[in-house]
Amino acid sequence: MTSFRFDIGGRARKAGRFIGRVRSELLKAAAEEKDANGVTAGELAKKLKTRNSAINKQLEGESNLSLRALADLAWALNREISFELRPLNGAAGQNIPAETSTVRGQMKVIGGPAEDSSTLPSPPQTHVVTSKTVKFD
Amino acid sequence: MPSIATLVESGAILKIEVELGPREQPMRLLYGTPQFIQWLEGLLEGAEPEVRLGEATAAEQVDDLFYTYLSGKPLSHVRQFRVVRAEKNAVWELKTPDVRIFGWFMARDCFVGVFGDWTDRVKDHDLYRGYRIAIRRLRRELGVEGTLCVAGIEPSDVLSF
């Protein structure tokens, strides 16, 4: 044996990687806010009227993150949450779907349903994105 | 002088893989010693720390860490990886909320896991020094200290982003 496959199964993989992706987005947003505006975990805690340790634990992934806590952090970080669930029907070797703004919702499918098309949507994604124009207060 | 290929052939290290997405391919390399693989097998059998901090199970945390690393995504310095001690040919630590993985980088984007342990156990018993010394000893035994070992301690020395 020269290789080892660490396979935890599809269900566990989906859960672990989703939790990991949310956490990575939070860490990235926190780092960007710190670099751009000098916002520290302490300031986030003050804004959310909680303790520094609570914020650090949330960012470290050392406490469960409820949807409300996630939304609160996004608000404190001045980020907008983008969440959607898309049908998972990509397959190995499939072409990367087109990302142009003119395709989605306007694509005419010839010769079969959308799931038979070679240009399929990406898997579900969650991003915490900068919202420079939206005011939450 | 050993190469990665000869280390794999001799069974000193094994390549570690996880399932990637349909449009993804490995962008980095991950290896483990037989002892580390045995520890991973324990995770697959459901091993958990006494008190779990993370929302995901220990195995899920490690799968996500390996996936992030192998798919070439950025890892957060200090929060997800860091040098154990600032020294030449350093030992590095990969981190999840409940797991610590100790090893070294044979080259940039090429990590070898040697020890895995629970975060609270590593902290409570201050196991950093012991693991660091054991890994340095292993590298000397394998004859890779001066060749298959990244000398620098900057994040960019071991990972490309």
Image: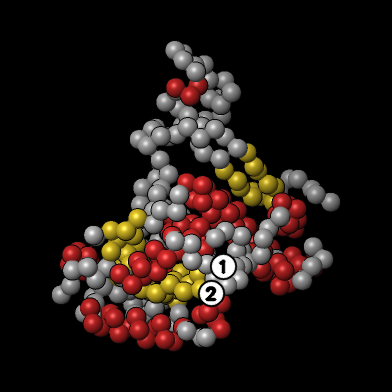
* Residue drawn at the location 61% of the way across and 47% of the way down: A127
Q: Position of residue A64 (x, y in %)?
A: 67, 60
Residue A63: % across, % down: 66, 64
- Image disc number at residue A12: none
Disc 2 to disc 1, how far (Cα)?
Answer: 7 Å
**Mark 2 belongs to which amino acid?**
Thr
At label 2, counting other C-alpha atoms closer than 10 Å, the crowd grade (few under 14, some 14-19, many 20 or more) is some
Q: Residue visible at 35% across and 52% down?
A: B26
Subunit of label 1: B
Image quarter of the N terminus of chain A:
bottom left
Q: Quadrant of residue A32?
A: bottom right
Q: Which residue is mark 2?
A: B119
Q: Earlier in the sequence, mark 2 or mark 1?
A: 1
Q: Which residue is depicted at the point 51% across and 73% down?
A: B118
- From the image, tell me which residue sits under label 1: B97
B79, B154: nearer the viewer = B79
The amino acid type, in three-letter code, at marker 1 is: Pro
Q: Are marks 2 and 1 in contact (CB under 8 Å)?
A: yes
Foreground of the two, A10 or A93: A10
Q: Visible in this render: residue B148?
A: yes
Instruction: From the top left corner, tell me how far across and down residue B5 is, in percent.
Output: 19, 64
**Vertically, is A48 above or below A10?**
below
Q: Is residue B131 left or right of residue B58?
A: left
Do callouts 2 and 1 point to residues on the same chain? yes
For the view shown, which residue lies furthest in the front direction? B45
Identify the image quadrant of residue B33. bottom left
Considering only vertical position in the picture, is A131 above or below B152? above
**Left or right of B54 in this view: B88:** left
Q: Is residue B47 left or right of residue A86?
A: left
Q: Position of residue B86 (x, y in %)?
A: 44, 82
Q: Is residue B87 something that shows in the picture?
A: no
